[in-house]
């Protein structure tokens, strides 16, 4: 099929690659700079060059102050909608600015200054957004840790980021369960050799917590005192190349990677994306249903909608069960959202509960124009169902924590291209996406290979990993010289549409959450009765994939395999957190291996998924695969 369309996409994308300085220089005009860039791109800086070198800016100013000054003071900036607390709270741009100025002043009183790190371990409450923007205001570098991670994961991040301050809350809320954050925070600080100077704790009425004298401070008391004293904090000028935040993401070992985001490139690319990619106009209501602990939440709950002067909905609830599978439609109708961004897993969950879309028809969705999906591959049956039910374009788009915004998508503002199910469509401006073989040679259309991005990456993409240039180089730039390695595999078709089919490393995608099976194997292997183990992702109808652990027990263990399997499930929840959704541990006599001792994970996965498989030529003992098949019976 050849694409005939009226979209400006082809012209815009071609120009972004032909004249990147001109293209991004023009996009930068949408941002209020304190000093403009001396060089739009300086190839001599950093690992592959840096965007907007020499520019001075403040991210919070561009998110709040300039909109208040520019006539949006009374427009809602953030609508917090929480079916879990049965509340809706709206903050105008002026109210948000006041909250941010106050908290920024409180943090400054603790000695937090430009470049200092602040960890936020927060549930989906508006204070979390206030805290992110308050850090940006004073040039501090925030690192948000997702609430579904356990104490050990938080400890690793504290150890690496060395925060001066930690902001947290007494609890998070999950359907039917209160998640006490404070014991997790205390345990994480105990485990870490690095200790914060102080913690600021938001007491939520659903469950309060004890504060440790001398270390913990009550958020509300500090806020009230600062307001009473009339304290505010001005925007601190930072370099465009200074870090705005660190966001840890799963790497191929248990140690997460601290992806760094800079101020200038992030502002420019995210602002550009709001209209050109998502088709949103300033003043419109936009809803991204992620969590602020993930990159999607950083970019599209907090930063991009505010850079754009839009209204952002923050949702503390689930697509199903809070209270029913009509939750998404209720929120869209009630707040008149024009677009929603979520993960395909949310739609699989809704479809299961409401296959004929009876809830959809109970709400007035007349304002709703577009559904965006990302975080995992959007499987064609789910996309087709959503299209039929909603009668609006359903747009899959592909990105990663490392890029901070979309790599390939369908640009609504530039004019949509025809949708092809199974493809997130085409590379966004600044991205030259190639599919290559092991020797970094581009492959012909429709041929599977490694997906790579030609350097330099566009603005907003990671300049490095936090204090780990070398690890960054090794992880992303060494294997395919001149390219960034996405660690995704796939192909492009003759029209240039990208198809992202799966990871080339040990990362699995569970309900849109990125997890390392290597990290889980480290936990399984730490159990005293486990001799050997393998963790891999197996198909799941709702979550896409769920982890499954195979255990070989040490000779002579006295406890039953069932007991040890239960231990293992609890251990992963304790060490990694509930987000791992690790519920399946299966004891086997031995693991299938190649003659050189490599575990045949790919073959085990095919057997577990019920996919066709062939006997690997290099297998040490073919009989092991029958044993695996037996062990899996009735378990997956
Ligand atoms: N704090 C504490 N625990 C959390 C948590 C948090 N912030 N978020 C999730 N968890 C827990 C859940 O309660 C669950 O615990 P359980 O094992 O006791 O049931 C576990 O972690 C797994 O969570 P999840 O995989 O999210 O499953 P779920 O059953 O709670 O919900 C979906 C399934 C599909 C409804 C949910 O994953 C979802 O809404 N996904 C969409 C995400 C999205 O929109 N992402 C945006 C693009 S990245
Ligand atoms: P994260 O860094 O958590 O956003 O996860 C990024 C990974 O999720 C990517 O490398 C892909 O493997 C996967 N992913 C995200 N969006 C998509 C998509 N639209 N299609 C296919 N895979 C996706």
Image (cartoon, rainbow, N blue to C red):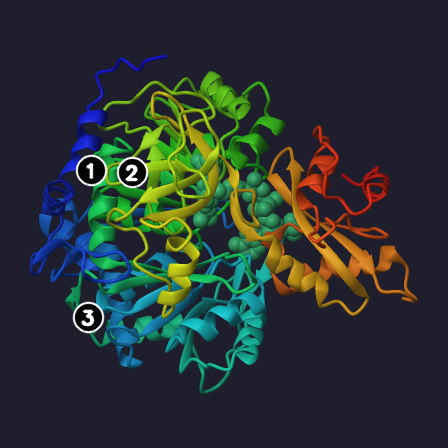
| Image disc number at residue 233 | 3
With respect to residue 31, does 337 lie above or below?
above
Name the spot of residue 154 as percent of width and height, x first: 51, 67
**Are the residues flagged by discs 3 and 2 in contact, CB closer than 8 Å?**
no
Name the spot of residue 326 as percent of width and height, x first: 52, 30
Residue nearer the viewer, 539 or 124? 539
Query: Left or right of 449: which side holds 246?
Result: left
Instruction: Using the numbered discs, state the Cα–Cα distance from disc 1 to disc 3 in whole angstroms.
Output: 40 Å
Would you identify the image quadrant in which residue 626 lies?
A: top right
| Residue identifier under label 1 | 17
Query: 10 Å neighbourhood of mark 1: few (<14), some, or many (≥20)?
Result: some
Residue nearer the viewer, 189 or 375? 375
Q: Residue at x 33, y 25 (%)?
A: 369
**Are the residues flagged by discs 2 and 1 in contact, CB closer than 8 Å?**
yes
With respect to residue 5, does 325 lie above or below?
below
> CB of residue at label 3: within 8 Å of ligand 1?
no
Query: Left or right of 242: which side holds 190?
Result: right
With respect to residue 563, does 307 lie above or below?
above
Quadrant into which the N terminus falls: top left
SS for callout 1: helix
Name the spot of residue 186 as percent of width and height, x first: 55, 76
Q: Residue at x 72, y 60 (%)?
A: 570
**For the view shown, which residue lies furthest in the bottom direction?**
214
Q: Earlier in the sequence, mark 2 or mark 1?
A: 1
| Image disc number at residue 432 | 2
SS for callout 2: loop
Total numbered badges shown on the rendered structure: 3
Name the spot of residue 564 as percent of width and height, x first: 82, 60
Residue nearer the viewer, 134 or 11? 11
**Are the residues flagged by discs 1 and 3 in contact, CB closer than 8 Å?**
no
Query: 10 Å neighbourhood of mark 2: few (<14), some, or many (≥20)?
Result: many
């Amino acid at each position: 099929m050849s694409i005939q369309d009226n979209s400006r996409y082809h012209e815009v994308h071609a120009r972004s690659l032909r004249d990147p300085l001109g293209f991004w220089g023009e996009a930068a005009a949408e941002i209020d700079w304190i000093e403009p860039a001396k060089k739009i791109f300086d190839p001599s800086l950093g690992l592959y060059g840096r965007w907007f070198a020499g520019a001075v800016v403040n991210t919070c100013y561009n998110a709040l102050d300039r909109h208040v000054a520019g006539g949006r003071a009374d427009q809602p900036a953030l609508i917090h909608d929480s079916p879990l607390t049965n509340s809706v709270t709206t903050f105008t741009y002026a109210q948000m600015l006041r909250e941010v100025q106050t908290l920024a002043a409180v943090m400054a009183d603790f000695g937090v200054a430009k470049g200092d790190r602040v960890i936020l371990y927060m549930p989906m409450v508006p204070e979390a957004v206030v805290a992110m923007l308050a850090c940006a205001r004073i040039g501090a570098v925030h690192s948000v840790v997702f609430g579904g991670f356990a104490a050990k994961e938080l400890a690793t991040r504290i150890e690496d980021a060395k925060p001066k301050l930690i902001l947290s809350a007494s609890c998070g809320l999950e359907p039917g369960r209160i998640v006490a954050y404070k014991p997790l925070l205390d345990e994480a600080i105990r485990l870490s050799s690095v200790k914060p100077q102080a913690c600021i704790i938001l007491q939520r009425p659903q469950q309060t917590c004890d504060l440790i004298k001398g270390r913990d401070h009550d958020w509300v008391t500090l806020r009230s005192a600062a307001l009473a004293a009339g304290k505010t904090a001005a925007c601190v000028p930072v370099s465009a190349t200074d870090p705005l935040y660190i966001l840890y993401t799963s790497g191929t070992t248990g140690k997460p990677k601290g992806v760094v985001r800079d101020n200038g490139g992030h502002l420019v690319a995210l602002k550009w994306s709001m209209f050109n990619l998502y088709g949103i106009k300033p003043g419109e209501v936009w809803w991204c249903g992620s969590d602020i602990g993930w990159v999607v939440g950083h970019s599209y709950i907090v930063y991009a909608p505010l850079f754009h002067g839009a209204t952002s909905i923050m949702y503390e609830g689930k697509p199903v069960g809070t209270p029913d599978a009509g939750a998404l439609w209720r929120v869209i109708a009630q707040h008149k959202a024009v677009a929603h961004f979520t993960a395909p897993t949310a739609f699989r969950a809704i479809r299961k509960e409401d296959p004929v879309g009876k809830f959809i028809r109970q709400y007035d969705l007349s304002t709703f124009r577009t559904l965006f999906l990302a975080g995992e591959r959007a499987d064609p049956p789910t996309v087709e169902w959503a299209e039929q039910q909603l009668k609006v374009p359903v747009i899959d788009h592909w990105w990663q924590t490392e890029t901070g915004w979309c790599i390939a998508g369908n640009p609504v503002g530039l004019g949509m291209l025809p949708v092809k199910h199974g493809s997130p469509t085409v590379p966004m401006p600044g991205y030259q996406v190639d599919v290559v073989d092991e020797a970094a040679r581009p492959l012909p259309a429709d041929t599977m290979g490694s997906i790579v991005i030609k350097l330099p990456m566009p603005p907003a993409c990671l300049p490095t990993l936090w204090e780990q240039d070398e690890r960054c180089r090794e992880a992303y730039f060494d294997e395919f010289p001149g390219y960034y390695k996405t660690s995704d595999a796939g192909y492009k078709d003759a029209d240039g549409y990208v198809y992202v089919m799966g990871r080339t490393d040990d990362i699995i995608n569970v309900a849109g959450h990125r997890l390392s099976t290597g990290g889980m194997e480290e936990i399984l292997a730490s159990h005293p009765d486990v001799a050997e183990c393998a963790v891999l992702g197996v198909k799941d109808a709702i979550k896409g994939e769920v982890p499954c652990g195979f255990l070989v027990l040490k000779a002579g263990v006295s406890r039953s395999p069932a007991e040890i399997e239960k231990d293992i499930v609890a251990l992963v929840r304790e060490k990694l957190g509930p987000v791992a959704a690790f519920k399946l541990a299966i004891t086997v006599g031995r693991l299938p291996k190649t003659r050189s001792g490599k575990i045949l994970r790919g073959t085990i996965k095919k057997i577990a998924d019920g996919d066709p498989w062939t006997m690997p030529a290099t297998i040490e003992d073919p009989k092991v695969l029958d044993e695996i098949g037996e062990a899996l019976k009735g378990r997956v």
